[in-house]
Image (cartoon, rainbow, N blue to C red):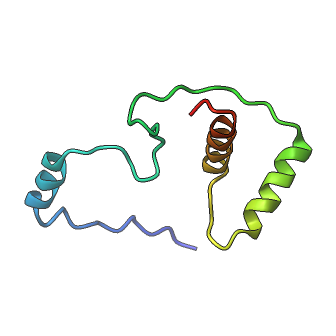
Amino acid sequence: MPIARKPNRPAATSAVDVDALINRGGGMPPGAARSAEGGKTTSILLRLPAEMVERLDAALKERPVRLPRHTWILEAIHEKLTREGHA
């Protein structure tokens, strides 16, 4: 079987589009974690028993709308703090 050359791709047709994208700048990507106050966030290491993670994932699958595990855990922490009067 003969080997074919890689096809040539045409160069970008408009440098204006690229410049507009670059000049537009950026911000936080959609879904990026921000604190409720809009301040800094801190990363922590959370160790959970495998059975608890499986139960959490099963509960998340039953929801009608997809919710990330991270968001669910943040909501649970917030609810606990509110219940104990720390919010």
The C terminus appears in which quarter of the rendering? top right
Q: Residue at x 69, y 26 (%)?
A: 45
Instruction: Left or right? Give the position of 6 relative to 87.
Output: left
Q: Nearer the viewer, residue 78 or 33?
A: 78
The residue that appears at 41% across and 35% down in the rendered structure is 37
Give residue 59's position: percent from left, percent from top.
79, 61
Left of 19 or right of it: where is 8?
A: right
Task: Name which residue lies at 10% across and 57% down.
Answer: 15
- As drawn, 42 above or below 79: above
Could you say which is closer to the camera, residue 80 or residue 25?
80
Residue at left offset 38%, top offset 48%: 29
Residue 51, percent from left and from top: 91, 46
Quick check: 53 left or right of 9?
right
Farthest residue, direction right: 51
- Position of residue 7 in the picture relative to residue 77 (left or right): left
Residue positioned most to the front: 85
Against 21, residue 9 (above or below) is below
- Number of numbered labels in the structure image: 0
Q: Position of residue 30 (x, y in %)?
A: 41, 53
Viewer-closest of 4 and 31: 31
Image x and y of residue 83, in percent? 68, 40
Q: Quadrant of the N terminus?
A: bottom right
